[in-house]
Amino acid sequence: QVQVVESGGGLVQPGGSLRLSCAASGATYSIYAMGWYRQAPGMKREHVATVTPSTNYTNYDDSVKGRFQISTDRAKTTVFLQMNALKPEDTAMYYCTALVGPPQALYNYWGQGTQVTVSS
């Protein structure tokens, strides 16, 4: 079992920045990748960014490329999402996920989410 807890959300003006954090605990040795998703009211949950700690491979949705950066700490149990040049359309609940297991049979563990609101 893996637990993930997000922090760092809040209210920011358009063009501003926020840094989200996600701390994993439990069987962290089994984590294959960690990532961020977001869900706006009435919308489906969508992928934002993913990092594979063992290789540092990163993957971003086109809507955030060049503005958001995902990274991990040295222990590879905390993942960060640096969000720059924020837009109102980035407003959503942001969820962290830890993907656990072998690549052919990954299981997602989800956090409770942290709200990001971009508004003037």
Image (cartoon, helix red, strand yellow):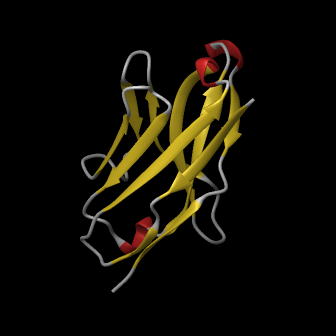
Question: Vertical placement of 8 versus 12: above or below?
Answer: above
Q: Residue drawn at (55%, 52%), measured in percent from left and top?
A: 6
Residue 61 relative to residue 26: left or right = left
Question: Vertical placement of 27 versus 19: above or below?
Answer: above
- In x, y percent, where is residue 38? 55, 56
What number of labels is visible? Answer: 0
Residue 118 relative to residue 107: left or right = left
Q: Residue drawn at (30%, 46%), measured in percent from left and top?
A: 65
Residue 61 visible in the current orientation:
no
Question: Vertical placement of 64 versus 101: above or below?
Answer: below
Question: In this view, which residue lies farthest toward the bottom?
Answer: 120
Q: Residue drawn at (28%, 64%), measured in percent from left and top?
A: 17
The quarter of the picture where the N terminus appears is top right
Residue 94 visible in the current orientation:
yes
Depth check, front residue: 21 or 99: 21
Question: Vertical placement of 94 versus 81: above or below?
Answer: below
Depth check, front residue: 49 or 44: 49
Depth check, front residue: 104 or 95: 95
- In x, y percent, where is residue 46? 56, 51
Depth check, front residue: 46 or 56: 56
Question: In this view, which residue lies farthest toward the right?
Answer: 1
Give the image quarter of residue 43: bottom right
- In x, y percent, where is residue 54? 44, 16
Residue 88 relative to residue 28: left or right = left
Q: Residue drawn at (38%, 82%), measured in percent from left and top?
A: 119
The quarter of the picture where the C terminus appears is bottom left
- In x, y percent, where is residue 107? 72, 28
